[in-house]
Amino acid sequence: MTESGTSDSHAAVPLAPPQLPPFLASVFDLKPILGNPSRGEVKLVHEAVRALNNFLHAPELRDTDLPIELSQHLFDIQMTCHRHKYPISVLPNDVIYDPPTLPTYIPVKLKPVAGPPSNEEIASVHTALRISESFANVPSIFAPDTHVQLS
């Protein structure tokens, strides 16, 4: 049983990260996650994805499925967070998704979304996410929590 009182078959399934090469594993100590991931755990996986994207041409990563596996791990984490925030007992059309407050350097207006999002609403979030990602190497203004919420 989850906190909402509904049965969730995914609640007890550990989310195991893929095996990282030593040069990434020494920086990103990804551990299996059981239950609802903490913000820190989600941010760490996002950081590992960004770091991996900077090293995709490294010889150790050629001919591996690591980028796909790490992206799938992040997706699984995001789905777990979604299930925790929006339990199964709530009908999809009754859910209102509230966007995070965006920093001023992301000039996109996001509105709350009720029910399934429109293509325009999805495109707006993707635009905001791409702008956020473009500032990942500028620590003085990059907002990792906002980036995690957008993803």
Image: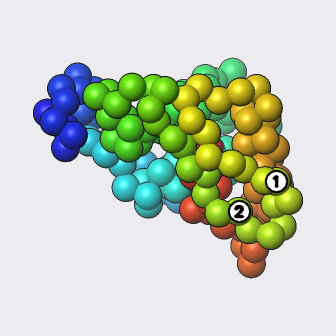
Nearest to the observer: residue 13 or residue 92: 92
At x 85% / y 59%, what residue is drawn?
Answer: 107
Q: CA distance from mark 1 to mark 2?
A: 8 Å
The 10 Å Cα crowd at callout 2, few under 14, some 14 to 19, many 20 or more, is some
Can residue 78 be spotted in the picture? yes
Q: Give the structural element (helix, strand or loop) at label 1.
A: loop
Numbered disc 2: secondary structure: loop
Q: Is 39 placed left or right of 130 in the picture?
A: left
Q: Badge 1: how crowded within 10 Å, few (<14), some, or many (20+)?
A: some
Which image quadrant is residue 53 in? Answer: top right
Percent position (x, y) of residue 142? 72, 67
Q: Which residue is the extreme one toward the bottom? A: 140
Q: Position of residue 75 (x, y in %)?
A: 52, 32
Q: Amino acid at mark 2?
A: Leu
Q: In the rendered structure, are the residues bearing label 1 and label 2 in contact, judged by CB atoms less than 8 Å apart? A: yes
Q: Residue at x 76, y 26 (%)?
A: 119
Q: Quadrant of the N terminus?
A: top left
Question: Foreground residue, 89 or 35?
Answer: 89
Question: Residue shown at 23%/22% (left/top)?
Answer: 9
**What residue does disc 2 label?**
102
Label disc, if present, on residue 108 of the rendered structure: 1
| Image coordinates for residue 58, horizontal then vertical, percent | 75, 40
Residue 13: quarter of image: top left
Residue 30, given in percent of the width and then of the height, sits at: 42, 48
Please state if 36 lies on the left or on the right of 62 as rendered: left
Q: What amino acid does circle 1 point to?
A: Val
Residue at screen point 24% across, 33% down: 11
- Looking at the image, tell me whether mark 1 or mark 2 is earlier in sequence order: 2
Q: Is residue 53 above or below residue 140?
A: above
Using the image as rendered, state which of residue 14 and residue 83 is in the foreground. Answer: 83
* Residue 65 location, quadrant: top right
